[in-house]
Amino acid sequence: NKVKPPYNVSEINQQAAIDALEDYDTFENNLAKIKSEKARLQKELSTIDLVKNIYPSDANFFLIKVDDADRIYGELIDKKIITRNRTTQIKNCLRITIGRQNENNELLAALKTLS
């Protein structure tokens, strides 16, 4: 367990990832969609009052600083929107993964109602 990766990836999932990477056109199309949604989400998040900071990210997620991460995390859970509460690592921060357009729209709408 000391040298085990934090997330197990089954052989089936590993093969699916390899297959997906070999389908270059689909990979490029999906990458473009993720980048586009990431830019849109960052722009929209920056207009929401409860978002105090959006930390730079080269990944498919953002770390955002808010006034009360525990409260916001709980209220998002109540709305069946999953984020990651990282306040124990970085005070009042949530990690938001870039989702599909409709998922991102739900997140943004929920955050606007919590402001």
Image (cartoon, grey):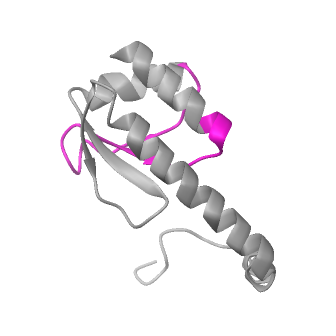
Q: Identify which residue is drawn at 52% across, 30% down.
A: 107
User: With 111 as the anchor, is 47 left or right in this view?
Assistant: left
111 is within the stretch colored magenta: no
* Viewer-side residue, 57 vs 88: 57
Residue span colored magenta? 79-103
The image quadrant that residue 29 belongs to is bottom right
Q: x%, y% of residue 88? A: 24, 45
* Viewer-side residue, 28 vs 71: 28
Q: Identify which residue is drawn at 49% across, 29% down.
A: 108
Q: Identify which residue is drawn at 32% across, 16% down.
A: 115
Residue 44 vertical placement versus 19 (above, below): above
Q: x%, y% of residue 102? A: 66, 35
User: With 93 as the anchor, is 16 left or right in this view?
Assistant: right
Residue 46 vertical placement versus 67 (above, below): below
Q: How many marks?
A: 0
* Viewer-side residue, 83 vs 25: 25
The image quadrant that residue 30 belongs to is bottom right
User: With 65 as the anchor, is 23 left or right in this view?
Assistant: right
User: With 69 as the anchor, is 104 left or right in this view?
Assistant: right
Q: Identify which residue is drawn at 63% across, 67% down.
A: 31
- Report the predominant secondary structure element of the magenta stretch: loop
The image quadrant that residue 66 belongs to is top left
Q: x%, y% of residue 15? A: 79, 81
Q: x%, y% of residue 100? A: 65, 45
